[in-house]
Amino acid sequence: MLVAILGYPIYYLVRLSFQKYDLFALLQHHGTYVGLANFRSILHDPVFWHTLLRTVVFTAANVGLTIVLGTLVALLLVRLATWVRLLVTAGLVLVWAMPPVVAVQVWQWMTNSENGVLNYILTKLHFGDFFQHNWYETTLSQYTMVTSLIVWGAIPFVAITVYAALSQVPHELVEAAEIDGARAWRVFKDVTLPVLMPVLLILTSLSIIWDFGAFTQPYLLIGPGHQTSDNYLMSTYLYIEGYTKTEFGTGAAISILMLAIVAALSVVYVRRMLRVGEQT
Amino acid sequence: MSRSRAARLGWNTLGLLLFAVMVFPVFWMVSTAFKTNDKIYSFNPTWFPGNPTLNHFSAAIHRPYFWTDVKNSAIVVALTVAIALALSFFAAVSLAKYRFTGRKLFIVLMIGIQMLPPAGLIIPLYVVLAKYNQVNKLSGVILVYLTFALPFCVWTLRGFLLGIPKDLEEAAMVDGSTRLGAFVRILLPLVAPGLVATSVFAFITSWNEYIFASTLLHDGRTQTITVWLSYLYGGNRFVDWGAIMAASTLIAIPVVIFFLLVQRRIAFGLTAGAVK
């Protein structure tokens, strides 16, 4: 039964992608078969390719920042006095618990051009004059904000997981390396990193999958009314083209292309979990 | 000695700085919610509310549809949790205790669904639910949330069940207990922490969910609270930040409370096997 619940939408998705299915079809409950026309028109549309490229760059930036900063935070946690560590961990959990829609509201408030606290702080710290600076003017600037929001929200999970994994690093080995005069970077690269590798691999593939499909943050932070072919990500692209414009067939075809890419990306994670699942 | 102490001081300072930066947005939300309007709209922000006011909270909860949408969220969350818990428990038992044909396919499908970006499934779910007249109804949303919550719940519960030695159950049966008796008295108490963890997970995901709620529910009377919040901003030239931050605080509170309860379990469920 579970299989049916999970499988049916996917079957339907494939069927839809071969149909012309607009609002009229939705009311009639059936579309007209058009073969590969949906795919052909998408793949011939430069907007699709630009969106794909933008999504890949966006994902790479977000995942890279999340993993690197998260790992650095975990490494810092080990070096802290107990009370500071507990404080920082509590802060991380608090951030982790913020609902995404709430976080978006807070970001909107902090970064608004009229009296956002971000402009105030940047000006006070002498980074330049940010008085009434509009962060949502260019696509790059918009996505700097979206990225800061996503990375901020994602660091806790990575940091806490890596911190747990760090306890598996053999103490004697680190000490021995230090006595032998190895520099901090060498110790990290040759002793700590190999132990962390499996965890980092999983965290990276999970982050790739999540960030590639990110929707709530870019859609709401940039604003539902400001989604254009100049700033689409795959998720907002399919949402606007498929749902908002009620061309469900086109939307389904974009979804399939997107899901295929995600499926390819998640092979590492699924294989790993499958190995865990084999235990009985 | 003094060198390592200086290093320690340096790390701790860095730690406190990190804490300040990470927590600042949350602090700013709560602080704004209690500030008076002249402080909120001042060009020179003040860090603390000074004379705290509850006006923004009362403005927020008296906005149209606040209570209706809180009620909708509560209904959706309660039913999703209850159904997910019941179904996933039996699925997890069969997965952990028995080898059946199609078991591998089942696992792949389960993990696969978890991996799919929700945005990719908006279209088919919308069309299918429209076909069965489930659009703009809470039942449709609950069905969708179940689809996404079940895999994680089954997976986590399975981990808990595996931790229980088989002999324990058998010993109870040898002692004259029926299968049901063994189940209720031995198995159930042992997986109770797992049931708590999964129900909290289902609670948080369905309370926080935005994409499906916003596509499937069309008006104020049927919306959930996250969709309600997303509509607070915009529309007017004047943005009532005090009320938005007060509402944000109220909506975050239940999640924060439940999250603190089970944060550990969730981290381990997602990376199971890699950490150990």
Image (tube, coloured by chain):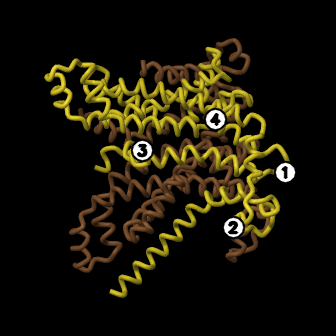
The numbered mark at residue B266 is 3
Decide which of B115, A122 is in the foreground and name it: A122
In the figure, is residue B27 to the left or right of B66?
left
Same-chain status of marks 1 and 2 = yes
Which amino acid, mark 2? Trp
**Of marks 2 and 3, which one's residue comes earlier in the chain?**
2
Amino acid at circle 3: Ile
Q: Secondary structure at mark 4?
A: helix
Callouts 4 and 2 in the same chain? no
**Nearest-to-viewer mark from 1 and 2:** 2
Q: Given the image, what chain letter belongs to the residue carrying mark 4?
A: A
Q: Are marks 1 and 2 in contact (CB under 8 Å)?
A: no
Quadrant of the rendered image containing residue A101: top right
Residue situated in front as seen by the camera: A251 or B239: B239
Q: In the drawing, what numbered circle is on residue B47?
A: 2
According to the picture, the residue beneath numbered tag 4 turns out to be A238
Q: Secondary structure at mark 1?
A: loop
Query: Amino acid type of disc 1?
Result: Phe
Q: Which residue is mark 1?
A: B238
- Of the residues shown, which amino acid type is indicated by label 4? Leu
Where is A91 relative to B74, above or below?
A: below
Chain A colour as displayed: brown
Number of other residues with Cα within 10 Å of mark 1, as a class: few under 14, some 14 to 19, many 20 or more: few
Q: Chain of mark 2?
A: B
Q: Nearer the viewer, mark 4 or mark 2?
A: 2
Q: Residue furthest left?
A: B174
Subunit ID for the residue under disc 3:
B
Q: Position of residue A9 (x, y in %)?
A: 53, 23
Q: Against A207, is A245 above or below?
A: above
* Pair 2/3: label in front: 2
